[in-house]
Amino acid sequence: MTTKHPDVFSLDAEVMDVIERKFQEKRRLAHRRERQLFGIFQQEELTAEETWSLKFMFAYMPVNDLADYDGELFLSHVRQTLKIRKAMPWGERVPDDLFLHFVLPYRVNTENIEDARGILHAELAQRTSKLSMEDAILETNYWCHERATYIGSDLRTLSPLSMIRNARGRCGEESTLAVAALRSIGIPARQVYTPRWAHCDDNHAWVEAWADGQWYYFGACEPEARLNVGWFSPPARRAMLINTRISGNYGGPEDVTLADEWFTEINLLENYARTRTITVHVKDEQGNPVSGALVRFELYNMAEFYPIAALPANEQGEAVFKTGYGDLLIRAVHEGRWGECVCPASSGERVEIIIAESAQPAQSVDLELVPPPETEGSAAAPLSESAIERHNERLEEGTAIRSAYEATFMDEKQALELANRAGLPPQRVWEALQKARGNSREIAAFLEANTAAYGEWPLRLLESMNEKDLIDTWMETLNDHLVGALAHKDGLPEEIFTTSVLRPRVLYEKIVPYRQRFRSSFTEAEIEAFRSAPNELARRLEKQYAYWEDLPNLKGRGNPIGTYELMGGDETSLHILFVAVCRSLGIPARLHPSELKPQYWQHGIWEDATFDATGRAAEGNDRWGTIRMLPDPGTGAAPPAPSYAENFTVARLENGAYKTLLDPFGKHDVYAQSFEAEPGDYRLVSGIRLPDGAVLARLTYFTVNAGQTTDVPLTFRSAKTTLPVLGTVGLAEPLTLLDGTTADFGQLAGSRALIAAWLEPEREPTKHLLRELSELAEPLSEQGLPILLIIGDDERTSSFDPAQYPKLPANALFLRSRDGDALPPIFSQATASEAGFPHVVVLDAQRRIRYSASGYKIGTGKEALQACTQLEQNLGGDS
């Protein structure tokens, strides 16, 4: 039965009934914060548009946002957005459905929410209002380039305003800024992801924006002179999924990957790549369809099998997935039992999986997995010389604006003066202020105000925080954590106190001032009882907790105060709350480093504050086992150096699926000591990525028992590679250094192999390569081979400074490209030319090309090192 509703946003009565029903469900869930969230509906001046905009937002709002923010923030956002729609010339041309799903939303990713729409609008409205929608999108991206550029960082997403303050961020933060900016001028925009690449490790995010009936794509903060162009276009043609998640029941024309009750995931892959549709039929051992089985489409990336999609089987036991022409491992899980198979690109589009297993295989399994092949894109009409020249000028102007802003950050001299006044170690003070960037004066003021009373502890608090935390944490918050923690310092080992009491962050949540609040929420008698038996605190917290499975990427992102006020959310949020309250009461607590299970320190050991499937605190403490990795005994070629999440991972079998342990990325001293692991069945995945993107993977299965050490040999498959002659390079002699002086190529190169790379320093792919070379500085320096980093005049901006890369190998040299230093012909081939910078070659002693790579490809630095090593060992041959 439908109810008569006012005519708002072209919504029919049935849709409005759904919104009303879901709004009321969220309102019941958030009843503890009724006044803070829903008191705004009592305002008499609310219009029908404002009311239904708010109801739409609340209906599909993540529970964390119900916990962390107040209704006034959302009302301000709605009013500004409706005002913008009327003010911008294209506002009325945007259909209501697109407006609700791609303009109205206040959230893009997992960022902290701020009342930023009006601020961004004030920056952009005048610059864009007289342009076409397409040109307004391009202009907005030039503005984003003025405000921020790429740098790799951790998984917490900075808000748009924090991103501007920082002036740099990872691709997920760049695209969050660009989407928020476009929405602030009324243009529909969405962040799109390839969850994981198939041809190399890592992932990427970019932006799609709508203009007059068509969606266009672009790279956020990396402007091009026209839309539907980006350095990631060639990699996207090799993707296995490109998607976006939309709050609400979105009914647009795109393919739907997953229609959840609270969100919709749409599949955009066919706009970028060739696609195929796989239909998985899940059956039991008797041949009956298994309705509700979870079908995981797993892609090898970062040495794990990552589920790029997880879809429930329908009543016929079917799950349908549109993907690319690469290999997948498909695993179907139901009630702890499972079945799996490899689905190669060459197979048919019908896959049958029998769910029969509850235990894992006894023997190791070797797999060879192939990504989609490289393909050429459609040739675009060439731009005019004047358009190219103006575009390059805009890039230079944007870089200069951003550089001028960065010049306002506190510098090393100011850090030294502060350190001297406060009596603190200068280098440590400078490191903290350097990380704080646009927030450096706030951090400096905190140190200045507190060092006299607390000595080095204010600085040590800053050092206990993640680098990104220094960008968006204010003095009020820092004071709360400093004073609240130091009250409990006595009697604890210093390391335990620093990492598990003083440290404000638990996981990826926004840091807020919670200590005084939690300290005042319990009586002294309760606090003493919790200190004696922290599981009593776990019982107290879970007793009134309402469990809600939130959006997958927002689990554990809510701040502890919000979670405490709402007493509802996902399981990880409860665990974070437990740890935060413990630290506030002087009880050392943490989430286990690899398992993310809540623990507290008592009697000199870490105890589990275990929760069952519903979160209820359990009695006792299960004993842990340990895993000890053993070196590959080796039967031929030397195995690669182990590196966690680069060429191996460990995962535990949970309810029929493997959950990867979260050991530090890049950890390589894996043989030095054993590590804790819960009892259970495990899978070790090791893999060697070949230059063409294919993977030689090995799956090794083992079991960990409580109280015992399990030895696990870390073995890799043998990968024999040849280094054929691909061409020659005619580098000019002498070469020109950045300062204008010259260097003799013959003397630089000598009679050994070398690496040469042509760079575009402002773009993300080049920054990835320079980061990889920095991470490989030790082995590259040991080899002593020349590394020539060549930058053309067209690619170099005035802000480029080699000092930004202090960790490069000692034998790396930046050079200027002159007219005679043309790119080798190998890079004029279609796929390499379109892939763009960086272009990398390894040359042998005869200056012949023995390895080449172009464009975005994580792992290029390591491949170049391996090629050099092979040439130095005279294993390359001339074939």
Image: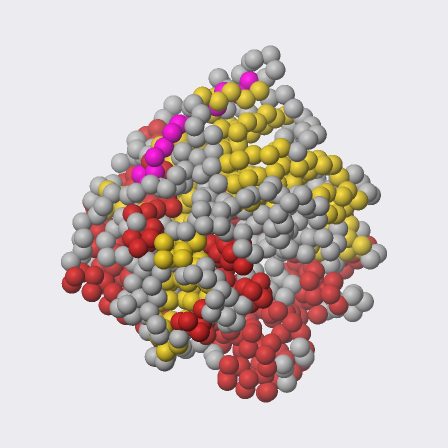
Q: Which of the pair 68/467 is nearer the observer?
A: 467
Residue 143 image offset from top left, x and y in percent:
30, 63
Residue 193, picture quadrant: top left
Q: Is residue 614 visible?
A: no
Q: Is residue 356 magenta?
A: no
Residue at 62%, 33% in the rendered image: 365
* Left or right of 665 in this view: 799: left
In this picture, which residue range is highlighted in magenta?
271-283
Residue 273: within the magenta? yes
Residue occupying the point 49% across, 64% down: 752
**Main SS of the magenta segment?**
strand
Q: Quadrant of the N terminus?
A: top left
Residue 594 at least partly seen: yes
Residue 294: percent from left, percent from top: 54, 28
Image coords of residue 56 (percent x, y): 38, 41
Closer to the camera, 646 or 1?
646
Q: Residue at x 55, y 61 (%)?
A: 776
- Viewer-closest of 338 and 740: 740
Q: Going 22% across and 59% down the picture, which residue do you hit?
A: 128
Q: Is residue 326 above or below residue 427?
A: above
| Lateral position of residue 492 relative to residue 364, left or right | right
The colour scheme of the drawn protein is: secondary structure
